[in-house]
Every structure is written in C-alpha cells, then in structure tokens.
Image: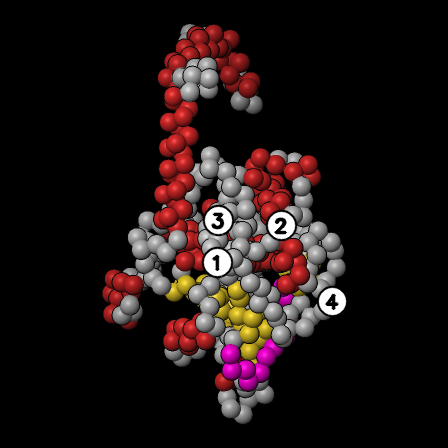
Amino acid sequence: KLIVEPGRDSCPRLDQIRLVAFFNIAASGPNGARALTRKILGNEEYCMQIDAHMTFVQDWDEIAKEEWKKTNNEFAIISTTPANIKDKSNYESWTGSMQGEVPRQCLVRMSETQIPEYASPADGKMKNVEMPLLSHAWSSAFSFSKCHLEETTPYDPFTPYVFGAEQFARFARFWTRGYDVYTPTKNIVFHDYESNGHDIKEWFRRRRERLRRQALSRVHLFLGISKDSDIPNPEAAHANMGIYGLGKRRTLEQLETFTGVHLGKTGNRQNTMCINQAWVPYDTSISPLENMFSKPTDLDPQPEYSLRTDFVYYHEEVEAATDALVGIEAARQADPVIKTSNAPSTMTLFILWCFGLIVWCMLFVNHGGGKGGGRRRKKVGGTKDV
C-alpha cells in the first residue's frame, strides 16, 4: 500500500493519487514505465513528468502554469535539466551566488548508440530572463505541458531498456508534430544527483541486451540513421511505428538544422550557442496526429486511456483508424479474390496435440513398475541402486 490506513490523515490529497505498481523483475527501463502512466491519465489539462528523488519549490504548480502561459504556444513544453538540490539555497537566496539562474541544456553530443544525447547536468545557464526561451533540448527529468502531448506523442513501449537516448528520440517525435520546448525563467524542481549505490544500468542483463539492440534499431530507423537493409529484423522495428514514430508538421531535415546535429554522423555539436533560437513554422492544417509512417492495418495495439474521456486529439484519430480497419475487413469478406488462410483451426491443433501426448505416454512412460524401469529412472536421476 502507498500509505497504511492509519496514516491517511497525514496525506490529505491521498484520494487524488493514482499509481501503477508492478514487481521490479518486470521493469524494462524508463520508456516501459512511463508508457504505463497513460493508464492513470484522467481528464487533467496539464501534465508534468519528473524523475525520481526530486524536490519542489513552493507553489510549483502555479509557477509551472505561469511559465507555460508566457510562451503563448498551445504546443509548448516547459523543460530543462533540473538544478542540483545541493545548490538550492544558492539559487533561492537573494544573496546566493546562483540567484536568478536556471540551468539550460546547450550541447548535443552523439552517444555510443549513434543517437544524440544531452549533457546532464546541464552545461549552460540563463540568468534574470523574463520570458521562457526556445530550446533545442528536452529533459525527461522535468517536463510540463498540456496533456494532449500524451495523446499525440505517447511513450513508446516497444523500446525497452533504452536509457539516455530516449530523450532525443521523443524530442524528435513531438517536435515533428509541432511541439516546442522552452527553458523556464525559474527553477521549479531540484534534483538529488547523489549516488544511491545503484548502477543506472544495472537492469541490463545479457538476456535483455538483445531487446535493447532491437529497440535502438527501431529508433535508428525513424530517425533516418539506419535503413531497412541495415537492420536485422526490419519488420519488428516498423511495428506500430505510426503513433510511435515521427509526425508530419516538420521534417527530419528541419530537425537537424534546428538542433545542429547531423543524424548518422559522429561528433558533437560544435556551435553550442543557446540564444536566439529561431522558431520553425509549420502548416497548422496538418494534425499533430498525422504520422510519417502510416499503415492503417498496423494499428494494434493502440495506447489505451481507460480514465481519460475528454480527448483533445486522440479520439478523432482512433475513430478514423477504426473506420479504416472496418472498411478493410468488409472488403476482405466481400472480395472473393482475397484468399483466407488454409491453416487448421485452434481446436483442431489442440485435439492433435492431445492425441500426440497420449501416444507419447503409451510409448515412453513405464506403467509396470519393474526393476528395469526403476533402474533406468534412478540412473537418469543420478542416484545408485541400494
């Protein structure tokens, strides 16, 4: 339980808390965990994502909404790498050496996975700024936006065990759908960067590395770093790529120009200038739900929002996709040219399996209990006759 019954009075807003719990043995990295949050997303207007071991400033919720409204952008995302909690007093005190400063991510570097990564902690800062600044970086440790971001760009559950590289991957997905990231003018959360004794990638296991490589191949594919011919299993990499891939409002070429990163090439961004970022316009008639990879027969499983009923975008796309699937199925039933499968039914396979099991037992299972049979069983078990 989150809080035992006698302790409910100490948490007056306990009834507003929703959670998804599962055993740590089922953990598959940040993407898998954050993909589950859609199950507890209700009709909230604003959504905030944070890392673990964080501390909030006073009135953090009002401050976050004020920062978002300052952008005058429905598709704004307030985000930056949080400041270190050890420096909290220096940031907040009017006599502190960091008073008025906010960390800002500048450098974009190519990681060993060939996917761009941002510096953490942040390598830049801004001071005494009145308006949030457009940024080419996004931090999963702190992100505040309208909740329709979770409808148009949900976390991809098909990228398990990916850490670090998942930030640029999701940035590319929502940026091409028309979203923009802004660094706030104030620190809203602080992060505890002290080591807790656990390796950040300790859940990597040899048996899981194969899944991680497949996930990275999937990211390489939609970022244009790799082609189908470069990937061992391109069909798996393409699976459900629609809503989990890029949008159509902006292009990968525009993304490279905006971030200063040439996808598929090694090396760091040489120009780390963090000011005067130019906003990239797009055709507003294009929905943020329009997918670069569009296959109406490849829409299962779609993300489900069991508690959200007041959708902004998502329900329209789901209805259209459902209509398309119904039309395809109707055509398949009506068109005599389309052949159905000749494979045996599930019931037939089950009967054959039972029959085979009975025959196997009759041939190989000893029912007489003789000495010979006993010796054979003891020999297999590694014991000796007494």
Front of the two marks 2 and 3 = 3
* Residue 358 in magenta stretch: no
Q: Position of residue 76 (x, y in %)?
A: 48, 66
The numbered dot on residue 292 is none
Residue 339: x and y, percent?
Answer: 46, 17
User: Which quadrant does the N terminus fall into?
Assistant: bottom left
Callout in the foreground (4, 3):
3
Q: Residue at x 58, y 40 (%)?
A: 237
Residue in the image at 55% along x and 63% along y: 281
On screen, residue 301 above or below 21: above
Give the numbered dot on residue 290.
3
What distance separates the C-alpha of mark 2 from that of mark 4?
21 Å
Q: Earlier in the sequence, mark 4 or mark 3?
A: 4
Q: Position of residue 384 (x, y in %)?
A: 55, 20
Residue kind at label 2, given as amino acid type: Leu
Residue 123 falls inside the magenta stretch: yes
Tag on residue 270? 4
Question: Are the residues flagged by discs 2 and 4 in contact, CB closer than 8 Å?
Answer: no
Q: Marks 3 and 1, how far apart in space?
A: 12 Å
Quote the CA–CA distance across marks 4 and 1: 32 Å
Q: Which residue is mark 2?
A: 223
Stretch in magenta = 118-131
Q: Can you tell which mark lies on residue 284?
A: 1
Tell me which label, 2 or 3, sits earlier in the chain: 2
Residue 204 to residue 53: above or below: above
Residue type, label 3? Glu
Q: Earlier in the sequence, mark 1 or mark 2?
A: 2
C-alpha gap between disc 1 and disc 2: 23 Å
